[in-house]
Amino acid sequence: MNGHQMTIATIDVETSFANGRAHSEAAKGSVLSAHDINYTVKEAKSCCRTKDKQILFNVTGIFKQGMTAILGPTGSGKSSFLDVLAGRKDPAGVSGQLLLDGKPVPKNFKCMVGYVVQDDVVMGTLSVRENFAFSAALRLPSSIKASERKERINNVIKELGLERCADTKVGNEFIQGVSGGERKRCNIGMELIISPPVLFLDEPTTGLDANTANTVLLFLKRLSRHGRTVIFSIHQPRYSIYRLFDSLMLLSQGHTVYHGPSHEALEFFTSQGYVCQEHNNPPDFFLDVINGDPTTFDRNAISLEKEIESDFENAAQSQHDKLVEGFRNSVWNKNLQEEAKGIYSTFEARGGLKGERYEAVNYATSFFNQMVVVARRALMNLIRNPQTSILTVATSIVFSVIIGAIYWQVSDDPIKGFKDRSGVLFFLIMNQLFFNMSAVEVFINERKIFMHENVSGFYRVSVYFLVKVIFDIIPLRMVPVIVLSVIVYFAVGLNPGADHFFLFAFCLFCTTVSAASLCFLISSIVRVFAVAQLLLALCYVLMMLLGGFLINFDSIGPWLHWAQYFSLFKYSLSILYTNEFKDRKFCSSSNSSICEFGNSYLTKQDMKFETQWDFWQNYLALILYAIILFTLSYIRLRTMKKTR
Ligand SMILES: Nc1ncnc2c1ncn2[C@@H]1O[C@H](COP(=O)(O)OP(=O)(O)OP(=O)(O)O)[C@@H](O)[C@H]1O
């Protein structure tokens, strides 16, 4: 079993999951065992060189029904081990064997288990019940009847003690919602809906006050009593929390320094010469020992104490080595290894499954069902979070009124008219681009929720992407464009005629969607909002400069001429100018015999406008621009690493 890659196969749990077993009896008392787990990552050394860094060293653990806490100093590998157990690490870096009830975990193990991430991943605009219904609609197989789903949701609400706030919105920065503890329980409930055989939680108490943390852990304890295997990483818990643990795993620098019943941990440390003072909190004491705190030594170990005083770091290291060695030779490890060996030999005796790759299991529901459920949530989110849309429309109205007032009924004079009209059109395109910069936060804000839901098997990447584009990005941009077009077009007095108005409005819409596609691409690549904004502003400024309207092409080197094809200004302004000036005669108001055709102005601007194709190719370019950038964003979403 040493050094082998993690094997992947399907197991019975999956079948029971698909059959929608009754909530209370599902996956009762599942045993997850990890055998000789090693985990290595590739660490970047320089720009093109990487080095292997081992994070976990031959970690063996058995996790039964009840609460198991994984404890250790910061950087000891708690989160890494939890992720490996939950199947959320790249299998390429993991070796060893994971067994669930003595059988290999399936390829989609991460979708079957519950994993409560540290961050908040519930939708604030939905109520607790609606969030659970969202999880149930996507993660339970379609074969489960609506009434059974409803019953499961009610059971989870009851199990987590959320009856009082079941129909309250979870809350976000705009909406007052449930309390911190209820919110955490709501995150847990999203996972419990599928009756997972094992529930993982990454530092469930982080960000909660002491009392709330206590309440959450009490609920977990109750869940574990009802037949669940609960495994979580935790930072220095208080005694009131520690006493709830059934089993404990202590890690130090990726090695196990204790794994066994939590109430026997002190005994193990005493056996190694470390005595916990009477009123000391055991978890604090364990961490102090692992961190090499000299006060944790037995008074008899004087020579070692001296060593610590002289060289603290070396002493901490030697204390770590001593603990690892101590545990390896302890009775606790002997029992653990024997039990693990028993499970492993049963698995081997069954034969057949080791090393085989079974087909990946599909999502619980169809593409169409996912589209409906995710789109419904997006629309509810849009309606219940109207601040963004209202602000966008209000800003659009104010801006349009200002533009209308400044450029009120522009003159038909060939000199003044050309200047004012081209000015307002240029300004409008610039506004459409910069006004859309808010779209860059779309994916940055939702990155965590998307990654969690996608990894947990809620929906396909394509579903999220299509819903985002069709029900979020496009509608949010359509209304302001209509408002702006109506106000500005008639206030400024642009080319009369319904056909010209619609061509104008359609051009602004295409420009907005193309700009939004660029925002979406950048937000799928960059994680930091400020950096994304800076990148976007840089792109727009370059587009403006190289679009051919602020500088004569003869003045730029030929080597830069290609850049114009990436400029949205080039296409959008070509449409708006042609729509406004082509075949129109502009005469001086003071002397009607002084007239000039708009065509001559277009020629001076180096614009092609003679044929229909000259005009329509710009729309085509804008549409292709949006399609290509949205496709690149989709590829980026698909290929991005979604596990840590
Ligand atoms: N992808 C990676 N590249 C390089 N080092 C990594 C990577 N992932 C984890 N590590 C390192 O592995 C060690 C264990 O990390 P891990 O996050 O599992 O620790 P932890 O015990 O959960 O820490 P904390 O309590 O601070 O969250 C750390 O030293 C961390 O820097």
Image (cartoon, rainbow, N blue to C red):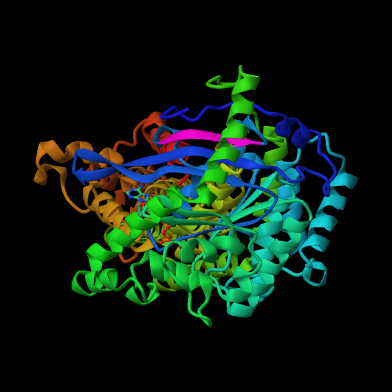
Q: Residue at x 38, y 51 (%)?
A: 325
Whether residue 97 appears in magenta in the rendering, the answer is yes
On screen, residue 24 versus residue 56, left or right, reads right
Residue 297 in picture, x, y percent from top left: 37, 72
- Residue under the image location 52 percent in, 44 percent down: 334
Q: Which residues are magenta?
A: 94-100
Vertical position of residue 78 compared to residue 263: above or below: above
Judge from the rendering whether residue 285 lies leftward or rightward of residue 349; answer left or right. Answer: left
Of residues 440 and 88, which is closer to you in this image? 88
Q: Which residue occupies 76% across, 33% down?
A: 18
Q: x%, y% of residue 340?
A: 57, 38
State whether residue 574 is above or below residue 78: above
Using the rendered image of the protein, determine whether residue 56 is visible from the camera's viewpoint: yes
Q: Which quadrant of the render holds ligand 1?
A: bottom left
Q: Nearer the viewer, residue 524 or 486?
A: 524
Q: Main secondary structure of the magenta part?
A: strand
Q: Residue at x 53, y 64 (%)?
A: 267
Residue nearest the viewer, comparing 34 with 15: 34
Residue 405 in the image: state x and y as whole percent.
Answer: 44, 73
User: Is 494 one of the magenta-colored residues?
Assistant: no
Viewer-closest of 338 and 42 = 338
Q: Is residue 108 visible?
A: no
